[in-house]
Image (cartoon, helix red, strand yellow):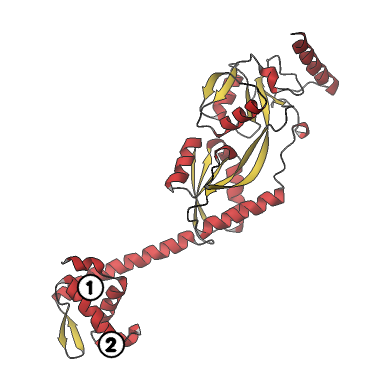
Amino acid sequence: MNKGARLMELTQLDYFLTVSRLQHMTMAAKELNVTQPALSHAISKLESELGVPLFDRGGRNLRLNRYGAAFAKWVDEALASIRKGMREIEESSSPDTGVIPLSYLNILGVDLVPSLVTAYLERYPKVRFELIQGDNADIDEQLESGRSDLLLTSKETVTDNREWIVIRRMPLYVVVPERHRFANLASIRLAELSGQPFVGLSKNCGLRDSIRARAASADFALASAYDAEDLITVAGFIKAGLGVSVLPRTPGLLLDGLVWIPIRDEDWQWELGLKWRRDRYLSPAAKRFIAFVRERSLADGVAPERPDESSDASSAGTPAPAHAEERDRHAAEQQDGHAEQ
């Protein structure tokens, strides 16, 4: 085979199969809706590229020779595979039957991801999700490598080439073990954690940057006694009495023996949302999911749960103080103690 064979086009191969099936140039030209000279030229060019004749010619009638018969078998299989691939791409990108590759932070697999996916499949039941979970570094790599089109994550890692839709703003709480001296407080300021062993997060956790940025804006540094890889480990360390931390009150973290104290400082919320790259192709299926998330976000008003509207500041199984007056007294005593210091 000479180097020219690399220049073969799909049209040439389609023409060849039609001529080999009809074995008549005029009939093939009519079926393909091309002129006979154009078809003859295409077949001759193909034979030249291959370096062998494909037909025995007798006037307008043609008969496949042994080279043509062997080549037709492979061309037929190749074109069938190409057509199958084209159908698969069309189906996988279709907004009605497509595939949506979606990566998400581990902790969001407890509540946010299942609720979104379930709601979307109720509307578009033939769509399929490819779900990949991981820590912040894992899912960012999935987006950068192109394995995922979309991320469900926190806002802190949004860069110039990424788009963002906020889905939920979750209030953050100071979390302490039930026997901690802060456990009866109705609310707390972050400065009151000074000197407390703090259970921090590794750099691969999406919440870490959010907490650090807010602490810095409050001119307060949190000194970590331990750094955990994920939020559930943080909750476990707190339960064991190894320290205190700041967490969102979300399913998966509500362990017995923890007390959740609302933060009085402003803007202590964790913003979660959908992220994607603006400089990369998005399938119609992915675009429709983005539109769905935007519609849902607007309908919900992404209103944060207000700490004073939650059931109480305690964990399940750990009752809050019985009366508001008692909670206020504890808070006042805590503030007086700091004033004396």
Q: Is residue 328 above or below residue 171?
A: above
Q: Which amino acid does label 2 sit on?
A: Gln
Q: Name the residue under label 2.
A: 36
Q: What element carries label 2?
A: helix
Residue 295, x across and y down, in percent: 66, 54
> Is residue 212 visible to the viewer in this orientation of the structure?
yes
Residue 313, x across and y down, in percent: 73, 26
Residue drawn 82% across the image and 17% down it: 329
Residue drawn 61% across the image and 29% down it: 211
Mark found first going from the N terminus, 2 or 1: 2
Find residue 72 and name its label. 1
Number of numbered discs on residues = 2
Residue drawn 76% across the image and 14% down it: 334
Disc 2 to disc 1: CB gap under 8 Å: no
Q: Is residue 8 above or below residue 164?
A: below
Residue 44 lies in quadrant: bottom left
Question: Which of the two residues, 43 or 16, is positioned nearer the viewer here?
Answer: 43
Residue 297, x across and y down, in percent: 67, 49
Which quarter of the image is occupied by the N terminus? bottom left
Which quarter of the image is occupied by the C terminus? top right
Given the current orientation, which residue lies at the most extreme top position?
A: 340
Q: What residue type is labelled 1?
A: Ala
